[in-house]
Image: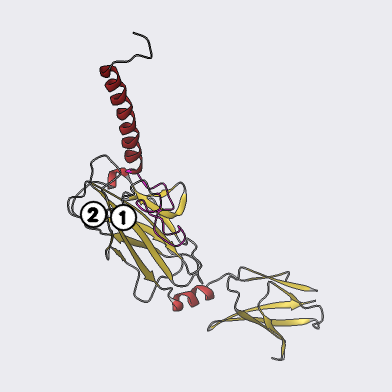
Amino acid sequence: MTSTNLNNSQLIKISTFFKTIALAAVSILFMANSGGSPGNRSGSATDGEKTCSTQGGCHSNASQPILSQDLISTDIPVEGYVPGTNYQITLNPTSEGAGRWGFEMMVQDANEAAVGEFTSNGDGNIISGNATRITHKFASGGGGDTKTWVLDWKAPASGSGDLQIFVSVLAANGNGKTGGDKLIIDTLAIAENEKASLQDLLNQEIVLYPNPVVNVLHIKGFKVSNAQILIIDATGKKVIEQPYTETIEVQELPKGNYIFKLVAEQAVLTKTFVKY
């Protein structure tokens, strides 16, 4: 027998070998993703609405419908999130007979940018060092009809505005393959607490320098752009009024003491400086 004359038994063995290799590769892929999403699969506009089972996701299966559930809840007050405050976001999907569970979540602003910071905990890990995204851990993906993950999230800085939480959840059938699984999605809108933002503004550490000043006064530590600048002399006369900028030309002002005011929203921040 030459190498070109293989009998049926040998062909069957070769075919079986390559099928085994292919199945092993699929199983490795499945097991890898059971430890967390590869990223950019939350279903948000930022991700191009991609999920783990749509638009090239490794669990794609056109025969499985996309399910929508009210599975997101938070401890954010009804008045809205306070910038820079830590909150918990809870995911509670349901799917009868799920063998494994997984998810990816992110929070998006009106400009479709990911905002806020997640922290890895017992239920989830941030993705590749990117704190704006979080996914399941292998240990937190066990099966069952229901699943609960509680994730830690820090709200973004003041002025981020209204936000949306996006999550895509995979209810895998646990057969070791990437087909036949169920995709569950949800979004939740959260507002910024305007009163809290105002207080955050009042608490900002504004620095004027140099002080005393001769020509140009600089402003450091102010984060809100839609504000007005007022400068008032010792007699109470308004000598400068202009939109907010980080520098102010004061060389034309007479020497003396001045009051500097920043007017933003309903807040007024007051400082003093000396003109030489």
Q: Nearer the viewer, residue 152 or 237?
A: 152
Q: Which residue is mark 2?
A: 147
Determine crowd level at label 2: few under 14, some 14-19, many 20+ residues with C-alpha closer than 10 A.
Answer: many
- Closer-to-camera residue (242/145): 145
**What residue is disc 1 on?**
169
Could you tell me which secondary element the residue under label 2 belongs to?
A: loop
Image: magenta residue range = 34-56
**Along the line of sight, which residue is nearer the eye, 108 or 250?**
108
Question: Residue 140: x and y, percent?
Answer: 28, 47
Is 267 situated above or below 236?
above
Magenta stretch containing residue 55, yes or no? yes
Q: Does residue 212 show up magenta in the picture?
A: no
Magenta stretch secondary structure, dominant: loop
Residue 161 in sight here: yes
The amino acid on which the numbered mark 2 sits, given as a three-letter code, is Lys
Q: Secondary structure at mark 1?
A: strand
Residue at position x 31%, y 49% in the image: 122
Q: Nearer the viewer, residue 43 or 167?
A: 43
The residue under the point 77% across, 82% down is 256
Q: Quadrant of the N terminus?
A: top left
